[in-house]
Image: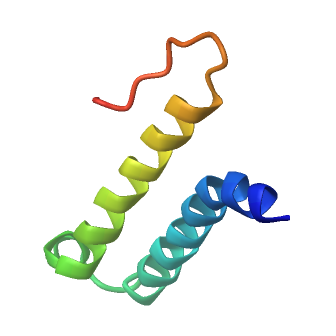
Amino acid sequence: MVIENDARRFIYDALTTEADLQKLETQYRTKPLKQLLANEQYLALREKSVANISALNAVANTQGKGRDDF
């Protein structure tokens, strides 16, 4: 059970971050895009999302060609 939870954490983190990003984007839907792009929380979530995708790529590649240094 612990191993399964550990394996799922990459997907869980990516989905959680994406949900948070969507929630924040919905709040700024009627406002100018500049305001969203200036929001520090949005920038941090976006950075975390890219890191999550990179980690998923590195873990999911079974042939050893997964990279997380992009």
Residue 24 position by quadrant:
bottom left
Task: Look at 54% across and 13% down and name the residue there.
Answer: 64
Task: Look at 30% across and 85% down and name the residue there.
Answer: 31
Residue 67 at x, y percent in the picture: 41, 23
On-image quarter of the C terminus: top left
Q: Is residue 28 above or below residue 1?
A: below
**Between 14 and 23, the one nearer to me in the picture:** 14
Lateral position of residue 56 relative to residue 30, left or right: right
Lateral position of residue 31 relative to residue 11, left or right: left
Residue 61 at x, y percent in the picture: 61, 22
**Between 34 and 18, the one nearer to me in the picture:** 18
**Between 17 and 3, the one nearer to me in the picture:** 3
Q: Is residue 52 above or below residue 65?
A: below
Specify the farthest residue to the bottom: 27
**Between 34 and 12, the one nearer to me in the picture:** 12
Task: Look at 49% across and 82% down and name the residue there.
Answer: 26
